[in-house]
Amino acid sequence: MEKTLILIKPDAISKKLTGIIIDRIEHLGLDMKAAKVAFVSEEIAKEHYANLAGKPFLPSVISFMRGDFNGIKDHRIYAFVYEGENAVSKVRAALGATDPAKAEPWTIRGAFGCFKDGVMQNCVHASGTPEEALREINIWFKPEEVL
């Protein structure tokens, strides 16, 4: 069975979208294996986005993931591990394109994502591949936290 990581970002939390996002993911028929509220330090954000090292936009991505935008200073996210057949592709399809302007309107990012003050607010992160999922799950969860 395939696992994937889902992070509900501070913009979605501030808009009180957590419940509806979880509901949409639950309807995919996957099994939740772990869930928690996590504090996003700068170090963990850098580790999570290590694949973007050296990119000029990395500081803004880290700042956004840490909730440092539009006057919000909330360093919490909701982290989940889901498991099931084709978990990565099912979740990615439900989320839609990373850019909310390019996401289909029925997807999570299409429905709830936006650009505000030049900042892309796309509500949620999900692993892009099964291999990426394993790396990311190990960043956010201890092995004993995942069923």
Image (cartoon, rainbow, N blue to C red):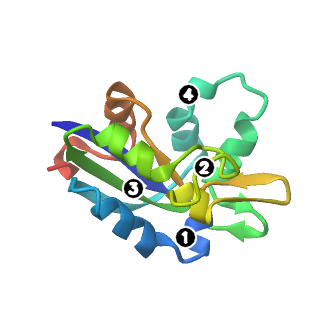
For label 4, count other residues whose C-alpha is less than 10 Å away and answer few (under 14), some (14-19) or many (20+). Answer: few
Q: Amino acid at mark 3?
A: Ala
Circles 1 and 3: CB distance less than 8 Å?
A: no
Residue 53 percent location from the top left of the image: 64, 24
For label 1, count other residues whose C-alpha is less than 10 Å away and answer few (under 14), some (14-19) or many (20+). Answer: some
Q: Nearer the viewer, residue 140 or 81?
A: 81
Q: Residue furthest top?
A: 54
Disc 1 and disc 4: Cα gap in Å?
24 Å
For label 2, count other residues whose C-alpha is less than 10 Å away and answer few (under 14), some (14-19) or many (20+). Answer: many
User: Residue at label 3?
Assistant: 79
Residue 103 is tagged as 2
Tell us which disc is closer to us: 1 or 4.
Answer: 1
Residue 50 is tagged as 4
Residue 13 is tagged as 1
Disc 1 and disc 2: Cα gap in Å?
20 Å
Q: Secondary structure at mark 2?
A: loop
Q: Amino acid at mark 2?
A: Ala
Q: Secondary structure at mark 1?
A: helix
Residue 84 percent location from the top left of the image: 19, 44
